[in-house]
Image (cartoon, grey):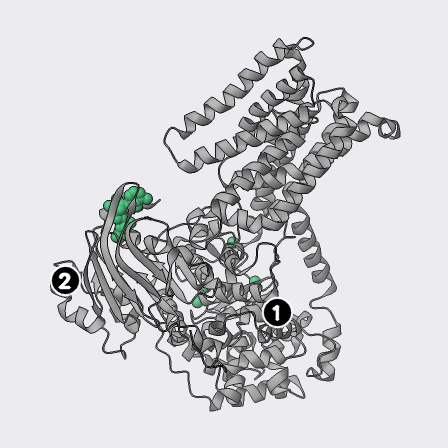
């Protein structure tokens, strides 16, 4: 980079000009088996990218592939313009895994779990500073759990536990947030609160990749949609195009969101799209991820 | 006692017990967390083979055991990580191979019989050598140092390995570190606790601590305390009763566990009787839920149709009835305060000369304030607040006084802040309040000095990071110049009557002593959370 000597400001410098995440002909899978093949995808700074697709289509596998949690067979993954193997600035990426509950073998308060999201910003020999503590409290506050920050996570409901996982990802103050079904099991009010929070973060330059079955939960936030089907990218385009073609892309899985009376009516352009899946399929997938 | 302490071997045994009692629970908590409670047992088996080799060759059994346990630890962890379905069987082969080999090897040695192993298996106080103590001391220092440096990383890996990997933590290295720590603990324990029983000293104190603690931190502290009491107490009793020390130590630890479990059950029942649950409560309170959040001792109450609801486990507790609320209001002399509003309403914006004037001021502010346009589902609950507000301080009967409580932190403060810089600023001005938020100012300063990324920097400080609010009179600091003379006097008085004060501190003390509220305490939990999201939007 040949920046002029008086660098504009660190904030302006942080969203690199190129894509934040770039996949080129990447295949990911587990063990010997490739689950998604030949995925090419570029996530640009400021994008709010929704990944849609039916159960087992490989959405989570793509996210895990980006993070290096799934096996990569072919292709390249670049993070912030660097090959993933050379990328070590882990706090810039926040991850919300697709899991419904937290492990509760030992007592852990909300604050302690969220605090683990901050560790990547601390040197291993270093102590927790006031800034770290403030970031953790703010992350808890953002997901609306500050009145329960000293509660054992095992005593929280499933939706509250999901919000703890979101707070954990936010505690590291990431530049990109990869969220795997963050709103599953979160009620309408808190989905709305979460959408508000994400909107503010996006305004401050956060890039978001979100796997979801309920586009409506993110209101008008989503700018781009990627549909994955049977391990292949079937659609990649902006929101408007997606909504024009959604019936054909999503076959007959397309239903309208029934809760949208609760939502804000003044964002008139929001057309709620929900891909609903049979209950049984949900349960089956829960087992594979458990 | 003095006679016992005068004995050389007892001094050594007590020191060794101190070291084991400290080290074993520190390592054990991560084993419990990873559901590997029995792995220490297996390593003890392998260490025994090392002991046998030491006896046979005439070298130090401690060093031989250390080598054997370390090798076993690394191999076991690598097998576990490989995730092969036969891994479990492989572990069994290693562990039983260890104990079988030790029996055979020791019987091959000229002066050894399998009976010699008993002291190593179950511990004996007479066996600690002076040279052992140095080794044990160094190893224990290593354990304490490593755990205190890496405990949150070990915790993170044990609680969510996949997430830890995504965050770039060296997961394999941390898992190996834990395995090595386990092996070292096994060796440190081999003299007084015994190789067959060490696993118990790693696990049982933690089991008891899980009952007593309220957080990872506090349960770890409890585990160390219980481990120390058990191991040192066990050595003393085993001297007096002439019993094997290892068995005595473990029995004492189990005794603590039973006491803790029964005590907690009794206490929980007492509490269940003592606290009232809000019935049929379908709504989940939280920031933005539309109900007033009112800090109360170490938690937040929500003002819900005239009741105070406090989140508790899966339900809500009723935290004060109308009479108590009205009581606060009366004692404080003006409805606007009621323990909370005054704490805010004082001060940076309103600076009332008298409480009544203050609430008048607030009332005028409210009257001139258009109702908050809101698109949130709870908007209605918020909308009717100004009316309740207007009736504040009119000296009506109890119901009005109770309604007066609606002048809580959110309303009064948000309004005042909005008057200045459009709503968001009220958090900031709070940070400037010299009376209640000195702590916040420090946090805000730190933030100003950087350390947080620019992304998060530009946002207003979060209320929960900001304030530790205290209820009632205790929230006021005598030095606060915004309080006025009456407020200053009241600030010097403790909140509540003497009777209540003593009762409360006794309760807190007792709860602290019994149930480990010592760890990550409720710092920040009594926060302004209810207003937080609101203030940001
Ligand atoms: N850990 C794993 N090991 C082996 N196979 C896996 C693993 N996780 C997922 N799979 C397989 O990969 C395929 C895609 O799974 P993936 O989790 O990516 O689906 P998804 O699109 O996220 O579905 P869902 O909507 O249910 O979350 C599935 O067929 C599943 O069986
Ligand atoms: Mg998935
Ligand atoms: Zn509420
Ligand atoms: Zn309360
Ligand atoms: Zn309620
Ligand atoms: Zn309760």
Q: Residue at x 52, y 34 (%)?
A: B74
Q: Nearer the viewer, residue B366 or B331?
A: B366
- B7 in relation to A74, above or below: above
Dividing the image into 4 quarters, which one contains the N terminus of chain B?
A: top right
The front one of A5 and A221 is A5
Instruction: Report the disc number at residue A249.
Output: 2
| Residue labelled with disc 1 | B469
Residue closest to the far front: A2
Q: CA distance from mark 2 to mark 1?
A: 54 Å
Percent x, y of residue A203: 39, 76
- Residue for point 53% across, 84% down: B417
The image shows residue B422 at horizontal and vertical percentages of 48, 86
Residue A262 percent coordinates (x, y): 29, 70
Pair 2/1: label in front: 2
Crowd class of label 1 (few under 14; some 14 to 19; many from 20; radius 10 Å): many
Quadrant of the rendered image containing residue B231 = top right
Disc 2: host chain: A
Sort mark 2 into few (<14), some (14-19) or many (20+) by Cα contacts within 10 Å: some
* Element under disc 1: loop
Chain at numbered mark 1: B
Percent x, y of residue B216: 57, 49
């Amino acid at each position: 980079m040949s920046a002029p000597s008086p660098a504009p400001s660190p904030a302006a410098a942080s969203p690199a000009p190129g894509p934040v995440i770039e996949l080129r002909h990447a295949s990911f899978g587990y063990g010997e088996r490739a689950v998604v093949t030949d995925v090419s995808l570029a996530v640009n700074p400021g994008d709010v990218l929704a990944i849609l697709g039916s159960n087992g289509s490989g959405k989570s596998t793509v996210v895990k592939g980006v993070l290096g949690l799934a096996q990569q067979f072919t292709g390249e993954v670049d993070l912030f313009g660097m090959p993933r193997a050379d990328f070590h600035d882990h706090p810039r990426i926040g991850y919300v895994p697709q899991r419904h509950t937290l492990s509760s073998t030992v007592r852990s308060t909300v604050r302690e779990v969220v605090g683990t999201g901050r560790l990547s910003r601390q040197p291993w020999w270093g102590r927790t500073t006031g800034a770290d503590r403030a970031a953790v409290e703010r992350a808890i506050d953002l997901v609306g759990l500050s009145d329960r920050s000293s509660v054992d996570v095992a005593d929280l409901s499933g939706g509250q536990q999901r919000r703890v996982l979101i707070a954990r990802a936010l505690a590291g103050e990431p530049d990109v947030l990869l969220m795997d079904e963050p709103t599953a099991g979160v009620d309408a009010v808190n989905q709305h609160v979460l959408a508000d929070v994400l909107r503010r973060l996006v305004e401050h330059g956060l890039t978001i990749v979100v796997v979801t079955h309920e586009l409506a939960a993110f209101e008008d936030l989503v700018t781009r949609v990627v549909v994955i089907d049977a391990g292949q990218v079937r659609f990649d385009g902006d929101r408007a195009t997606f909504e024009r073609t959604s019936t054909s892309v999503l076959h007959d899985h397309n239903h309208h969101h029934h809760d949208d009376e609760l939502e804000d009516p003044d964002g008139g352009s929001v057309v709620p799209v929900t891909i609903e899946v049979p209950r049984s399929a949900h349960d089956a997938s829960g087992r594979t991820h458990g | 006692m003095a006679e016992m302490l005068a004995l050389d071997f007892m001094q050594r045994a007590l020191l060794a017990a101190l070291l084991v009692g400290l080290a074993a629970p520190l390592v054990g908590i991560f084993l419990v967390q990873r559901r590997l409670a029995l792995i220490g047992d297996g390593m003890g088996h392998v260490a025994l083979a090392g002991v046998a080799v030491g006896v046979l060759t005439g070298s130090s059994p401690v060093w031989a055991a250390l080598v054997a346990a370390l090798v076993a630890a690394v191999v076991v962890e690598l097998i576990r990580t490989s995730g092969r379905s036969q891994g479990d069987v492989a572990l069994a082969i290693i562990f039983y191979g260890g104990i079988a080999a030790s029996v055979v090897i020791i019987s091959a040695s000229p002066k050894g019989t399998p009976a010699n192993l008993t002291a190593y298996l179950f511990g004996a106080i007479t066996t600690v050598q002076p040279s052992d103590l140095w080794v044990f001391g160094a190893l224990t220092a290593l354990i304490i140092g490593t755990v205190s440096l890496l405990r949150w990383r070990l915790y993170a890996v044990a609680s969510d390995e996949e997430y830890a990997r995504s965050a770039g933590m060296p997961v394999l290295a941390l898992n190996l570190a834990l395995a090595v720590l386990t092996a070292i603990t096994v060796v440190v324990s081999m003299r007084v606790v015994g190789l067959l029983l060490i696993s118990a000293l790693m696990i049982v104190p933690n089991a008891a601590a899980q009952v007593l603690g309220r957080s990872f931190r506090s349960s770890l502290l409890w585990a160390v305390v219980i481990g120390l009491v058990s191991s040192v107490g066990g050595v003393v009793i085993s001297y007096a009763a002439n019993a094997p020390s290892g068995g005595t130590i473990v029995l004492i630890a189990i005794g603590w566990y039973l006491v803790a479990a029964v005590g907690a059950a009794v206490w929980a029942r007492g509490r269940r009787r003592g606290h009232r649950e809000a019935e049929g409560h379908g709504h989940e309170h939280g920031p933005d839920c539309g109900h007033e959040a009112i800090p109360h001792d170490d938690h937040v109450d929500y003002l819900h149709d005239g009741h105070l609801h406090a989140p508790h486990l899966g339900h809500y507790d009723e935290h004060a009835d109308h009479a108590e609320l009205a009581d606060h209001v009366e004692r404080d002399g003006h409805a606007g305060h009621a323990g909370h509003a005054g704490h805010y309403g004082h001060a940076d914006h309103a600076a009332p000369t008298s409480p009544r004037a203050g609430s008048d001021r607030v009332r005028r502010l409210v009257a001139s304030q258009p109702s908050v346009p809101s698109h949130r589902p709870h908007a209605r609950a918020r909308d009717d607040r100004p009316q309740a507000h207007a009736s504040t301080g009119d000296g009506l009967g109890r119901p009005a006084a109770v309604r007066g409580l609606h002048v809580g932190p959110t309303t009064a403060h948000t309004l005042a802040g909005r008057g200045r810089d459009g709503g968001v600023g009220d958090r900031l001005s709070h940070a400037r309040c010299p009376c209640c938020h000195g702590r916040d100012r420090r946090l805000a300063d730190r933030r100003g000095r950087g350390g947080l990324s620019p992304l998060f920097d530009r946002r207003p400080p979060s209320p929960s990071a900001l304030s530790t609010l205290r209820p009632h009179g205790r929230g006021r600091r005598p030095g606060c110049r915004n309080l006025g003379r009456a407020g200053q006097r009241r600030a010097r008085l403790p909140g509540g009557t003497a009777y209540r004060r003593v009762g409360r501190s006794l309760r807190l003390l007792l709860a602290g002593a019994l149930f480990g509220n010592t760890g990550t305490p409720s710092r920040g939990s009594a926060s302004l959370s209810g207003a937080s999201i609101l203030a940001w939007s």
